[in-house]
Image (cartoon, grey):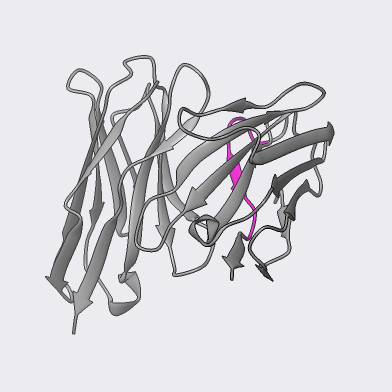
Amino acid sequence: GENVEQHPSTLSVQEGDSAVIKCTYSDSASNYFPWYKQELGKRPQLIIDIRSNVGEKKDQRIAVTLNKTAKHFSLHITETQPEDSAVYFCAAIGWDQKLVFGQGTRLTINP
Amino acid sequence: GAVVSQHPSWVICKSGTSVKIECRSLDFQATTMFWYRQFPKQSLMLMATSNEGSKATYEQGVEKDKFLINHASLTLSTLTVTSAHPEDSSFYICSARDQVVSGNTIYFGEGSWLTVV
């Protein structure tokens, strides 16, 4: 099945700076790559996603890039704000249609 | 948008008892639902795939006799933790995909906190 690796596990940036979280996946047949933000004890919230026929997608301060050849995708958050502090998960859907999550990144925005 | 509802939000039970968690798709039909478990400060780990009208398929290392899954209708899947023990205490969350309206968009339930004492 699919295996997703996520780095770093923790990330601390100054408010206003950019944050980048990277993930790799193992299943070359995977075709959907969502990113989630999760507050403690709550359901994951989809913040952006990308499909395998697209290399980059942007939504205001958030962007995701996908490199199918290298099997990695990244989340970019620009002009970070304190409310961006949370745990972020990347995920991928493999050939078996199962959504597999990365290990998570705890992002802290320092004022 | 599509909504997935999960109940109960939190439950405390005694060791050795069983607990049932429900996952409902409120405005779409879900032939497949997924159950995840999340321990504190860890990722969401897929436990099993719930298939409407057939047996669930379990991930490696998940005991099917301990975590009973029933998907009797297109809008309801249940997870029963049998003979619960303190190590089963965790955040359990379901998800479903609305393949008709939203393509492959995945919706999550609110999650259920299980504490076994």
In screen coordinates, is A25 left or right of B89? Answer: left
- Residue A59, relative to residue B14: is it above or below? above
Count of residue discs: 0
Q: Is residue A31 magenta?
A: no
Residue bounds of the magenta highlight: B102-110
Q: Looking at the picture, does residue A69 appear above or below residue B95?
A: above
Is residue B107 in the magenta section? Answer: yes
Q: Answer with the quarter of the image where residue B112 lies.
A: bottom right
Residue B10, position as x, y percentages in the image = 66, 69
- Residue at x-position 49% and y-position 56%: A44
Q: Nearer the viewer, residue A53 or A46?
A: A46
Q: Is residue B17 above or below residue B51?
A: below
Q: Quadrant of residue B98?
A: top right
Q: Is residue A98 visible?
A: yes
In the current view of this chain or complex, which residue is farthest to the front? B16
Please give the name of the residue rendered at 68% of the width and 27% of the height, measured from the top-left corner: B56
Which residue is painted at 31% across and 15% down in the image?
A28
Q: What is the magenta segment's predominant secondary structure?
A: loop
Instruction: Examine the rendering and report whether any part of residue A59 can be seen.
Output: no
Q: Residue furthest bottom?
A: A111
Q: Nearer the viewer, residue A63 or B6?
A: B6
Give me the residue at 24% from left, 65% from top.
A107
Residue B117: % across, % down: 59, 71
Residue B46 location in percent, x, y?
Answer: 49, 38
